[in-house]
Amino acid sequence: FTEIHDATVANVDITNSSVSGRYDVGILAGSNSEGGVIRNVSTGGTVVGADNVGGIIGYNIDSGVVTQSSSSASIAVSPADRDTPRAGGLVGGNYDGAIINQSYAIGDVDGVGRAGGLLGENFNNSRVAYSYATGSVNGSEYITGGLVGGNYRGSTVTLSYWDTNTSGLSTSAGDATGLTTAQMTGETAETNMSGLNFNSVWQTQPDGYPVLTQETSISDGGTTVPPEIRGDVSDEQYAAVLDGDDTLAASNLADAINGWADNGKVNGTDIGAFELSK
């Protein structure tokens, strides 16, 4: 998309992509605005642009939300005629009340202005929370950060993390926490990244970084729960396949929910997860 405006895009996986442009460049969309919601989206590939360049979207503005999403894309900023171009592994610029929540980026970022492993610039009462980044961040001429390059005008970065080893940086804008690779991988991640909700939203990996629960399939008593039926259940219809043959109707799904974990709301959208009972 060129622009997502007052709309929701959810449950999308884009791989092996190559996107290039000038301003506001991302694999899913150039920009997300006016309360647009991007949820459960993952991207991979390469993105090249001159300003506001990100793995999922280039420019998140005016209460736009990116939640429970991830990117492995490599980001590069070409020479630009703007003084401080922005580049991030997930989003280039986060502006005017925009939100990045429960998301991560693992791709490398090569910028020439404000560059961050997750986000280039957080500006004007915007928020980043419950997120992390691991990619290498190379910047010149201005500001770089392991998680966020710049954080300004009442914006906040909370309960979020970056890998000081792989990023090559010991600092980040906002109240983010730098950890080593060993501290962010395996079961130790649950202790060291205590701001993340490992009860329902995140899962540790034996030899890797945490992933979002919705990105995995869990076997429980012979029942496989596909990723597409995990997550926000408000105003949505789901069906589950049990043991490969029997189908659980969407109308009966509530009877099979085990411990719906409501993690709050973002712009009126319920954020949480559930599991099918045994």
Image: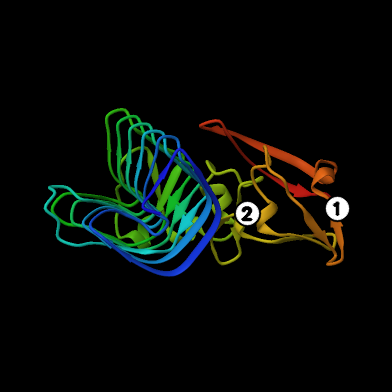
- Is 107 on the left or on the right of 52, as rendered? right
Q: Name the residue under label 2.
A: 214
Residue 90 rendering spot, x and y as whole percentages? 39, 53
Residue 169 rendering spot, x and y as whole percentages? 29, 55
Q: What element carries label 1?
A: loop
Q: Is residue 9 above or below residue 95?
A: below
Viewer-proximal residue among 67 and 7: 7
Quarter of the image where the N terminus is located: bottom left
Q: Which colour scheme is used?
A: rainbow
Q: Give the CA separation, mark 1 to mark 2.
A: 18 Å
Residue at 39% across, 36% down: 98
Q: Is mark 2 on a helix, strand or loop?
A: helix
> Which of disc 2 and disc 1 is earlier in sequence?
2
Q: Name the residue under label 1.
A: 278
Residue at 43% across, 63% down: 72
Quarter of the view holding residue 262? top right
Viewer-proximal residue among 264 and 40: 40
Check contact, mark 1 vs mark 2: CB within 8 A: no
Residue at 11% across, 53% down: 81
- Is 184 on the left or on the right of 223, as rendered? left
Residue type beneath disc 2? Gln
